[in-house]
Each structure stands twice: as structure tokens, then as C-alpha cells.
Amino acid sequence: MKIVQNYSVLKYFVNILPILVILLFTALNATPSNCKTEIFKIDREFLSSNFSKCEVLEENSIRLYLSPEDNSVINPSPWFAFRKSAHKEAIYVELLYEKFEHRYHPKVSNDLINWKKIEMDNIKIEDNGKKVILTFKANSDYTYISAQEVLSSAWYETWYKIIRDIKNVTISELGSTSVGRSINKILIGNDLENPYILLIGRQHPPEITGAFALKAFIEQILDDNALSNDFLSNYNIISYPLVNPDGVDLGHWRHNLRKKDLNRDWGFFSQIETSIIYDDIRKILNDNKIVLMIDFHSTFENIFYIQDESEIAGYNFAQAWLLKNLSDKSNYKFAIKPTKNVNNGVAKNYFNSLYGIPAITFEVGDNTDRETIINSSKNLADSMMLVLLENK
Ligand SMILES: [Zn+2]
């Protein structure tokens, strides 16, 4: 009888062993995505939010660990975005960059639309930028805090709804990523036989100043003035404004969900995002021509990467276009950097070497004034239209 009882106890433990192992494993790998004290809480309940884990330090203090989506991210674009609850007294949020350093000036918003920079008095940078302590006075609302303005897939959807009713604009879903996020195309044209300009955006998730520039650029082409109408009688635009929707909505620093830098995949097409887009481009290339490619990004300063003079193809267009903007009224200062083509999967290099067309990386500074980005991007769209019409 006793043996039978012991046997059933043993059997019980054997049965629950896998559950115990799972519980232990979960506890060891705990990465809580929200932290709560008696005073306030922090969570990631919105698109593009991200921190790798959080830890309660005191009732009025929470630490957020910041690290990239995978270990192969080498470019330090240390994104963070979180939401904090209301709190009746001052609280502290510590940003702890495990292997990287603070780069973006933190911004705050109540509605994910209007953002302002957190005042320097409330930001303490320590340990050579590896640790940043943010102080928040008592606040009666939920607030969003982020490295840069949050431009998630929802921001693009809102924009598409506004422009999709404009004459000659078609927005279509070409396919979706492995987890179902849409890859969309904006087509602008009234004669599909005309040559095409290709505009690409948001291969790299944190690069939102490039997204502001792309949006303003397209809006200027849709401005319905004499120049834009003349232009759209002669050229079409195709744009893939959000190449990496998974990375953007998950708050990644660089990669897509498959740990890949999409701007190292052109010509290789190992990823679903670049493959879907290239399949679409190929359909156009069967009958028509692409005459220009511009790829919008962000970095520390305003830079245009163009073809090297020794390679000629595309160099003259880029010079003519950008020289028209050197004394731009919007006061947008930029550098022009010719770079040689290498077969490294960068969109600029791929489109230039395969099609011999001007292919330009349009890099906007992280901290460039937002109004200036919009105004200068509209001027750059005007001058692109002028130069293309002059050389038609
Ligand atoms: Zn980039």
C-alpha cells in the first residue's frame, strides 16, 4: 500500500516536472514589460514603444534597460519609448544603456502627435552617456516619452487616408511581413507609360527625420500648382514609405524581425520586405523606366550621399539638383558626399549600379528643426521637378 502511495506521489511529480521547468525558465528570463510602484507605473502599451526590461528601484524610481533587438545591431541608434501613468509627486526614470550611449534628446507627448523636448534641467546624463536620469514633476495624465517623435504604422495609415482621395494617387497593399504587417505603395501618376521616380523610406526604424522629409517631399509633388502639374504630366512617382513596418512598430534600433538590416539586402533579396518591393518594381521595369531613386534616412547631420564623380552615372543630376538648393531660403545646411559603389546591399548602390540611374541617400539630421525639414524638403521636391523637366 505504502509503495503504491509513494509511486503515485512520484508519478505526480513526473507529471508536473515539465511545468516546473517552464516556470523556472520563465522566471530566470523574466523581462517585465511594465513596472508598477505605489506611486506610478510604466508600460509599453503603444506601437513603436520599446525598452528591454524594467526594474523598480524605489517607490518613485524605475530603471529601464535599453538594448537593441538582437546582438548583431552595430549602428548605435538607441531607441526608447515608454508610457508613464499619472503621479502625485516627482518621479525618476533611469535609462540604462547596457552597451551603447545616449543619443536622442528625450521628447514628451500626451497624444502621440504633439511632441516637445524635455527640458535640460530634467535630464541628468551620467557615466559618459551610459546612464540618463529623467525627472518628472507631478502629473495628472498618462504621458508618452520617446527618443524621437513616434511615427508608427498608424501614422502612415493616417497620412494615406488624407492623400488617397487626391487625383492620380493610388495606395495599395503589396503584401505583408511574416507577422502580417502591410507593405504599402503610393503610386502617383496620370499616364502610367511615363518614366518613374522611386522614393524609399524607413528602412531603419528610429530614422523619423527622414520620414518627415519623405512626407513633405511627396506632398509638394501633390501640391497641384503649375510646376507639379507639369511634372505629373511627364513623370510618375512610386514610393514605398515604410519598408520596415515590423521594426518600426516594435521599436527596433535597426533591423527587421529576422535580424536583418534591410539596407544591406538590395540585390540579395533574402528578406520578405525587399522581395515584395522588388517584385513590384520589376513589373514596372518590364515596360517603363525608373530614372531616379531617392532613399530617405536620418543620421547626425544633413547629408546627401551621391555617386562618385569618377562613376559619372547619376553624378551630374545630383550635382545639378543639390546645387539649386545650396542657398535655400529654409536655411537647411547640408553636405554632399560622393561615395563609390560597392556591392553591399545598400539601395543607393544597387539602383545605381544595376540601372545606371542617379541614386541618392537623403540623410536628415536627428536634431534638425522639424519646420526646416518640411520647408527644405518641399524646396528640394520643387528643384527635383525642375531639373527633371529641364532634362526630359
Ligand atoms: Zn538609415
Image: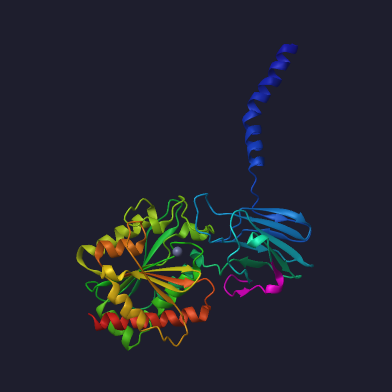
Question: Which of these two is toward me, 311 or 96?
Answer: 311
Question: Which of these two is toward me, 284 or 274?
Answer: 274
Residue 388, image x, y percentages:
27, 79
Residue 390, image x, y percentages:
25, 84
Give the quarter of the image for residue 379.
bottom left
Q: In this view, does 12 lie to the left or right of 90?
A: left
Q: Quadrant of the C terminus?
A: bottom left
User: What segment is highlighted magenta in the picture?
Assistant: 110-124
Residue 222 at least partly seen: no
What residue lies at 22% left-to-right and 68% top-to-bottom?
A: 288
Label total for image: 0
Per the image, is 146 magenta? Answer: no
Residue 306, image x, y percentages:
35, 70
Q: Is residue 298 above or below residue 334?
A: above
What residue lies at 58% left-to-right and 57% top-to-bottom?
A: 100
Question: Which of these two is toward me, 100 or 67?
Answer: 100
Q: Is residue 366 left or right of residue 41?
A: left
In the displayed orientation, state which residue is furthest to the front: 310
Give the quarter of the image for residue 3.
top right
Residue 267, image x, y percentages:
31, 55
Q: In which quarter of the image is the N terminus?
A: top right
Q: Is residue 126 left or right of residue 303?
A: right
Q: In this view, does 145 lie to the left or right of 168?
A: right
What residue lies at 50% left-to-right and 61% top-to-bottom?
A: 248
Question: Which of these two is toward me, 367 or 307?
Answer: 307
What residue lies at 65% left-to-right and 62% top-to-bottom?
A: 128
How did the renderer colour the structure? rainbow
Residue 96 at least partly seen: yes
In the displayed orientation, state which residue is furthest to the left: 287
Ligand 1 location (quadrant): bottom left
Per the image, is 120 magenta? Answer: yes
